[in-house]
Image (spheres, rainbow, N blue to C red):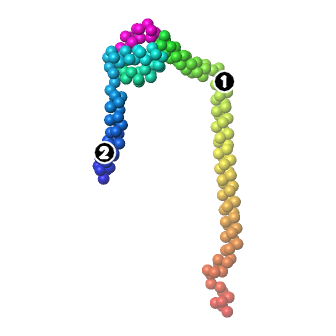
Amino acid sequence: MLVTTITFTRLYLCFHLLPYYLYASLAGRTSSLSGQEGVEKFKELVKSGISIRRALRESRLHLRCYKEHYGEIWSVPELEPYRLERFRKLMDKKQSEAEYVGANKHRSVLEGELDDLELKRQSVLRAAEEALDDKRIEAVANIIRDAVSKIFDIFRPAVQAIFTPEKAESGG
């Protein structure tokens, strides 16, 4: 049964994905450009103002070829501002991350102790709320237990009268 399920699943996936694969191959999306033609198309796209990520995608330049021709691509003087802009964005991102981490790392001892006390206060409050909830549950259980025992006490004589033989009938 498991083998047939796996076989049917494979067949379904093959026939389900086949039209998409055929369309992509006919449209030329599955092949990536390599070598000089991909590099030239990438350079043109970057010069036109498209982002580097989008230019890589649209030029269909394989990432391996991009890495191989990196020096050649960015040695063109017209592309220097785009490379610097990318580098600047990367550095700004790294700097903002460092500032965020640094702001959290370089706290005073008093601030650290206050934060620890606040965490302890919150945990004590949480424990108190849980204990209060437990007490409430216990109180409700006691009320229900008392009510049930009172109901049994009310009906006990009637139940005993039904199930115990009466002395008056047998003796009389």
- Specify start and end residues of the magenta stretch as a single range: 69-80
Query: Considering only vertical position in the picture, is 162 above or below 52?
Result: below
Quick one: SS at disc 2? helix
Instruction: Answer yes or no: is residue 102 visible.
Output: no
- Image location of residue 149, percent across then percent down: 67, 66
**Does the magenta run of residues contain 101?**
no
Q: Which mark is residue 51?
A: none
- State the residue at coordinates (67%, 66%): 148
Is residue 27 left or right of 100 when viewed as pictured? Answer: left
Instruction: Answer yes or no: is residue 14 visible.
Output: yes
Tell me the kind of residue under disc 2: Leu
Is residue 22 left or right of 47 when viewed as pictured? Answer: left
The residue most toward the bottom is 172
Of labels 2 and 1, the one closer to you: 2
**Does the magenta run of residues contain 75?**
yes
Q: Quadrant of the C terminus?
A: bottom right
Res 139 → quadrant: bottom right
| Dominant secondary structure, magenta | helix
- State the residue at coordinates (53%, 19%): 93
- State the residue at coordinates (66%, 62%): 145
Is residue 42 left or right of 93 when viewed as pictured? Answer: left
Res 99 → quadrant: top right
Q: Residues within 10 Å of mark 2 (few under 14, many from 20)?
A: few
* Foreground residue among 46 and 131: 46
Tell me the kind of residue under disc 1: Glu
- Image location of residue 152, percent across then percent down: 67, 70
Q: Which mark is residue 11?
A: 2
Query: Considering only vertical position in the picture, is 84 above or below 64?
Result: above
- Image location of residue 36, percent across then percent down: 33, 15
Q: Which mark is residue 111?
A: 1
Precedes in sequence: disc 2 or disc 1: 2
